[in-house]
Amino acid sequence: QGLDTTDHWFNVGASGGLFAKLNGTVRLGYQLRQAEGGRENFTHVNALAALGWPVTRKIRLAGQISRDFNTIATGASVDISSVGVRAIYAYSRKLEFDTGIAYGRNVFLGATQAQREDTFLSADLGARFKLNEYVSLAASYTFLHNWSSLNFADFVRQGVSFDLSSRF
């Protein structure tokens, strides 16, 4: 069973145009997570660097490196570190393709988590077609492989999605 937690997060950073043709967010901070009743407290340095680069008029690259706490469905705390890159190719004003890959590590914190540490690799591939300025169609494929220090938590997940979206 999970515990309620209180997070104290102190950070500094910058957003927007960081350098010529490079935009995004850079953040560095310190986080303290206190569990209800003071039974478990966790601290760490957290960081985020999310950068975008328009290589040409048709190609954009993006990357992200992050480290932060997260809470899973059982209420347990997880220390998550990840790195990912993404490429987007605008074939035309109506059609664009994208792909990405990410790698990360999840360290499950606390006495109830049995020294669990997971490593994951994910990749995705997608396309979006704008029918007009209000309606678009998209399709994507996602692959995730999770390796865990607990044998029963190793898994491979694949997914396909189809989206129809509109805006007004």
Image: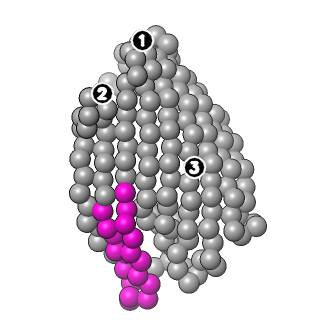
Q: What's the CA distance linking mark 2 and mark 1? A: 21 Å
- Give how far across and how far down residue 133 sits, in percent: 37, 15
> Which of the 4 image quarters holds residue 123?
top right
Residue drawn at point x = 41 percent, y = 77 percent: 42
Of mark 3 and mark 2, the one earlier in the sequence is 2
Given this view, does label 1 or label 3 mark the residue nearer the observer?
A: 3
Determine crowd level at label 2: few under 14, some 14-19, many 20+ residues with C-alpha closer than 10 A. Answer: few
Element type where label 1 sits in the image? loop
Residue drawn at point x = 60 percent, y = 36 percent: 124
Q: Is residue 45 magenta?
A: yes
In the foreground, 78 or 19: 19
Q: Does the magenta stretch include residue 26?
A: no
Query: Could you tell whether 38 is left or right of 102 in the image?
Result: left
Which disc, if any, is residue 21?
Answer: 2
Which region is colored magenta?
29-47
> Which of the 4 image quarters holds residue 33?
bottom left
Residue drawn at point x = 33 percent, y = 69 percent: 31
Which disc, if any, is residue 103?
Answer: 3
Which disc, if any, is residue 93?
Answer: 1
Query: Could you tell whether 138 is left or right of 47 in the image?
Result: right
Q: What residue type is labelled 1?
A: Arg
> As displayed, is residue 114 above or below residue 52?
below
- Give how far across and how far down residue 89 sits, in percent: 49, 20
In the foreground, 2 or 86: 86
Q: Is the magenta stretch mostly helix, strand or loop?
A: strand
Of mark 1 and mark 3, the one earlier in the sequence is 1
Determine crowd level at label 1: few under 14, some 14-19, many 20+ residues with C-alpha closer than 10 A. Answer: few
